[in-house]
Image (cartoon, grey):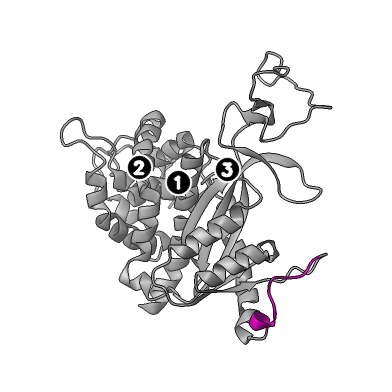
Amino acid sequence: MRGWDARSEVLFSYVNCEGRVPKDHPLRAILRIVDAALAALSPEFEGLYAKFGRPSIAPERLLRALLLQAFYSVRSERQLMEQLDYNLLFRWFVGLSLDDAIWDETVFTKNRERLIEGDIANKFMAAVLGQEAVRVLLSDDHFSVDGTLIEAWASMKSFRPKDGSGEPPPPGRNGERDFHGEKRSNESHTSTTDPDARLYRKGSGQPAKLAYLGHVLMENRHALVVDTRLTLATGTAEREAALEMVAHRPGNHRITLGADKAYDVAEFVADLRELNVTPHVAQNTTNRRSAIDARTTRHPGYAVSGSVRKRIEEVFGWTKATAGFRKTRHRGLVRVGWMFTLTATAYNLVRLTKLVGAVA
C-alpha cells in the first residue's frame, strides 16, 4: 500500500539526541576522552568566571563546539551556530537538547576570549594526555619536532611603513596597490591589521607572505602531539622553539629528537647535547659540513628516527585542512597560537579513537 505524503507536526517528541547517534559513531569515543579532560579542568574554569551574575556559555560546551569546528572544518562561527541549530549530531556532542536555544555568534566569540586569556588550550591538551588510558601510549624516550608556516589573516596591502609614509591604497572595498620598486622588510614595515605577523619566505623561489611559524613536538610511539608553540616568523624560530619544548619535558633522562635538515646547525646540535638529548637530525651536506657525525649515524636508531620523522607531516596536513587557524578569522600571536594548540589537540583525539580502544 502506498504511503501518504502528508506533513504532520507532532506536539511532543520522545526521541532525544542520544538516540539518534549510532552506537559505533567515532564521536562517542572522542566524547568520553573529552568529558574526562573537561572534568579535570573544572577548577581552572572556576577561576575564570565571577561568582555572581548572569550565567555565560558553559566553557565545557564552548570547547566541545570548537572541537566540532576543527573536526568538520566549519569555516566560521556563524556557520558553526547554523549547524548547531539543526544538526542533531552537533547538538548531542556539545550537550544541547532539541529545545535549547543557540547562541549568537558574537556572544560565542566573546566568551571564547575568556578561555584564550586563561590559556585553556594548553591545559586542555595536558588534561587529555594526562589520562591513564592515554598516558600508557606515550613514549618518553623518542620524539620528533618540526615547524610549519601559518599564513596570517592579513592582506599584503596592510604591510605599511612604520613611520606612516608610503602610498595608501585607493578607496574602495579592495583597492589596487602597486608595490613595484618598493623595498619592504620587517624592520621598516608592519601590518596595520595584524602587527604580530611577519613577512616570511618559506624557501628559495617561494613568495614572501605575512605569516607565523607553528611548531609541534611529537612522541614517536603512536605519533601523538605532546607540545606546541606558535612564534614570530624568523629564521631561527624553529630551532629556538625546539630547544624550549625539549627543555620543558618531564624528567632529565636522555632522549632522542628527530628533525629535518633545517635543524642541522652546529649550535643547535650542541645545545641539544647539553640538554641530554641525542640529535637524530637529518644530515644537510649541501655546500657545508653536517653537524651530525658518525657518533649518531652509526646507530640503528638514527635510521628509525628518519622514517618516523615523516609522521609529523600528517599533523600539519591535518591541521591545515581544518578551520583551526586558516579559515576562521583570528589575528595576533596569542589567538592564532591558542587555535593552533586546540587544533593539534583535536588531531590527538582523532588518533586516540582507535588507539585507546585497542589498548582497552
Instruction: State the residue in front, 83 or 52.
Output: 52
- Count numbered badges in the picture: 3
Please give the name of the residue rendered at 74% of the width and 68% of the height, measured from the top-left corner. 284
Q: Give the range drawn in magenta.
A: 288-297
Q: Mark 1 points at which residue?
A: 338
Q: Where is residue 285 in the image (x, y as percent from the top left)?
A: 78, 69
Q: How crowded is mark 1: few (under 14 residues within 10 Å), some or many (20 or more)?
A: many
Which is more N-terminal, label 3 or label 2?
Answer: 2
Please give the name of the residue rendered at 30% of the width and 57% of the height, measured from the top-left corner. 35
Q: Mark 3 points at which residue?
A: 326
Please give the name of the residue rendered at 63% of the width and 47% of the height, measured from the top-left corner. 234
Q: In this view, does 237 lie to the left or right of 84?
A: right
Q: Position of residue 151 (x, y in %)?
A: 62, 42
Q: Mark 2 points at which residue?
A: 115
Please give the name of the residue rendered at 43% of the width and 53% of the height, measured from the top-left corner. 1
Q: Position of residue 248 (x, y in %)?
A: 43, 62
Label 1 to label 2: alpha-carbon separation: 9 Å
In this rendering, the answer to whether 64 lies above or below 141 is: above
Which is more N-terminal, label 1 or label 3?
Answer: 3
Q: Is mark 2 on a helix, strand or loop?
A: helix
Residue type highlighted by circle 2: Leu
Q: What element carries label 3?
A: loop
Does 69 lie within the magenta span? no
